[in-house]
Image: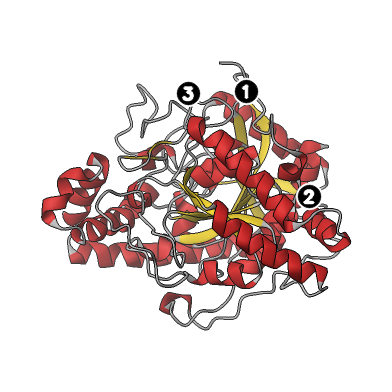
């Protein structure tokens, strides 16, 4: 199938970013209601083919947009993102919506409270237009479920958008919203960002509070997915903050998220991480990313090849992810488990086979790896890498055909290591394959340095699109 532009058919309002919308709301040139209507129309138009949404809440969105419109007219918006159309992944609590986690085993009873990130976005005036698809309990890096079906890539509907935040990525790519909340336990923001040609930022762990706690523990992050780094930065700022329900977040003081004035790539020491922790890099991906690295060097950065600290990172991640899957499945009534995704059940069984001693040993190993990564990011300003080692493959499959892989983790070797180390990582598009599929470029920074990572991503975004 030939390449197609995901924004084809999108109204002009669906193409506008948060800052442009705010300026238009302030001047009265556009109202939040008009923006919401355009985005709702777009979501309804693309959903039959691409299946990005589990819920499109037209009535709720228009009521929220009308309230935002009144605030802008009164000169009293709640924030600079008041009225910005926003989607939320079907894995975070939203008051008044049922959250199904993509599973037939869950209740359709409405939630009684917002998750912390949702509450902060609501407090900022974001307009929630709908809920986006996820695989069952977000367990894998593609997006399909028995409850909601297969989600498809807007560049080529025969291909997967990745996952587990695949619906959010599709919604962003096609202009069905400006802000899109995703989660990332092993690449679930960054992989679909790469596959669909958008921006996805996995924040420093703890930057965005999480409640209820994920069974996948402290590899699980919450972050923004957008069409630009400016929008990602604005969304992250709106959804970040301390929440006492998240014990793992702690009282640690994170560096501010304000833009770094006069940021320049010139003179920055950058490590080029070119080989994934598992799997191999598709030659076309390598060529496109290396061209991006060359442009980074041409901007004055000092680029050096690096390898990650020695550790069997796939095995280490499996100890954390598979035991998390076992914990998740253990919470499902035994008589209901026959309806659960077979791959999730297999992963849970593998996790159940780990002993408590092995899990504690894995936690110690993780601490050693994380400390080594902190040391590396003390010596380098950033690491850069391909976002994924391969382009999007056929929709509905956990693995590329004839790949020889057993689980999705094996082809996600550029993403899950950074969940283990909890560092911020931003993915931006850097080109297209000959088949017209997007290729992502990943920028990783020191823990807490989200603003610097996003500044670097913005600089590279300008270079790659210039």
Q: Which residue is mark 2?
A: 459
Using the rendered view, name the quadrant where residue 440 is placed: top right
Residue 108 lies left or right of residue 297; in this view the side is left
For mark 2, does the 10 Å Cα neighbourhood hold few (<14), some (14 to 19), or many (20 or more) residues?
some
Residue 301 lies left or right of residue 287; in this view the side is right
Circle 1/circle 3 CB separation < 8 Å: no
Please give the name of the residue rendered at 46% of the width and 69% of the height, measured from the top-left corner.
210
Residue 448 appears at what percent x and percent y? 61, 69
Please give the name of the residue rendered at 33% of the width and 48% of the height, measured from the top-left corner.
136
Extreme residue in the left direction:
335
Gap between marks 2 and 3 measured at Cα: 33 Å
Please give the name of the residue rendered at 79% of the width and 60% of the height, measured from the top-left corner.
22
Residue 161 lies left or right of residue 141; in this view the side is right
Gap between marks 1 and 3 measured at Cα: 13 Å
Instruction: Residue 231: give its label.
Output: none
* Mark found first going from the N terminus, 2 or 1: 1
Which image quarter is the N terminus in? top right
Q: Which residue is mark 3?
A: 158
Decide: is 305 above or below 451. above
Task: Pick whichever, 285 or 86, lies toward us.
Answer: 86
Q: Which residue is mark 1?
A: 436
Q: Secondary structure at mark 1?
A: loop
Q: Nearer the viewer, mark 2 or mark 3?
A: 3
Which image quarter is the C terminus in? top right
Task: Pick whichever, 12 or 210, lies toward us.
Answer: 12
């Amino acid at each position: 199938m030939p390449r197609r532009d995901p924004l084809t058919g999108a109204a002009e309002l669906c193409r506008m970013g948060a800052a442009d919308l705010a300026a238009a709301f302030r001047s009265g040139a556009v109202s939040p209601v008009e923006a919401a209507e355009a985005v709702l129309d777009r979501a309804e138009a693309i959903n039959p083919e691409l299946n990005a949404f589990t819920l499109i809440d037209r009535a709720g969105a228009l009521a929220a947009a009308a309230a935002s419109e009144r605030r802008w007219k009164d000169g009293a918006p709640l924030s600079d993102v008041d009225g910005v159309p926003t989607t939320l992944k079907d894995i975070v609590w939203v008051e008044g919506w049922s959250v199904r986690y993509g599973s037939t085993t869950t209740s359709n009873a409405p939630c009684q409270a917002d998750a912390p990130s949702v509450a902060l976005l609501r407090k900022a005036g974001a307009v929630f237009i709908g809920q986006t698809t996820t695989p069952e309990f977000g367990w894998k890096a593609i997006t399909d479920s028995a409850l909601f079906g297969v989600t498809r890539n807007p560049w080529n509907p025969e291909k997967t958008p990745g996952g587990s935040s695949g619906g959010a990525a599709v919604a962003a790519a096609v202009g069905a919203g400006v802000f899109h909340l995703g989660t990332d336990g092993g690449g679930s923001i960054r992989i679909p960002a790469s596959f669909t040609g958008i921006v996805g930022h996995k924040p420093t762990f703890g930057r965005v509070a999480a409640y209820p706690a994920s069974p996948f523990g402290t590899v699980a992050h919450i972050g923004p997915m957008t069409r630009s780094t400016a929008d990602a930065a604005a969304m992250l700022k709106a959804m970040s903050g301390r929440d006492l329900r998240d014990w793992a977040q702690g009282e640690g003081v994170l560096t501010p998220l304000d833009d770094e004035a006069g940021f320049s790539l010139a003179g920055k020491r950058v490590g080029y991480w070119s080989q994934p922790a598992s799997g191999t890099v598709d030659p076309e991906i390598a060529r496109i990313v290396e061209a991006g690295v060359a442009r980074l060097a041409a901007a004055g950065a000092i680029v050096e090849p690096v390898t990650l600290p020695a550790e069997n990172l796939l095995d280490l991640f499996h100890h954390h992810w598979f035991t998390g899957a076992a914990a998740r499945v253990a919470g499902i009534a035994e008589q209901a488990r026959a309806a659960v995704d077979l791959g999730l059940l297999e992963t849970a069984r593998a996790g159940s086979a780990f002993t408590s001693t092995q899990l504690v040993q894995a936690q110690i190993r993780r601490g050693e790896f994380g400390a080594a990564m902190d040391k590396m990011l003390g010596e380098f300003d950033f690491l850069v890498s391909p976002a994924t080692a391969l382009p999007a493959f056929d929709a509905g499959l956990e693995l590329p055909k004839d790949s020889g892989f057993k689980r999705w983790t094996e082809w996600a070797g550029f993403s899950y290591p950074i969940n283990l180390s909890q560092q911020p990582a931003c993915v931006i598009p850097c080109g297209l394959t000959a088949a017209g599929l997007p290729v992502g470029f990943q920028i990783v920074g020191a823990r807490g340095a989200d603003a610097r990572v996003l500044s670097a991503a913005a600089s590279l975004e300008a270079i790659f699109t210039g």
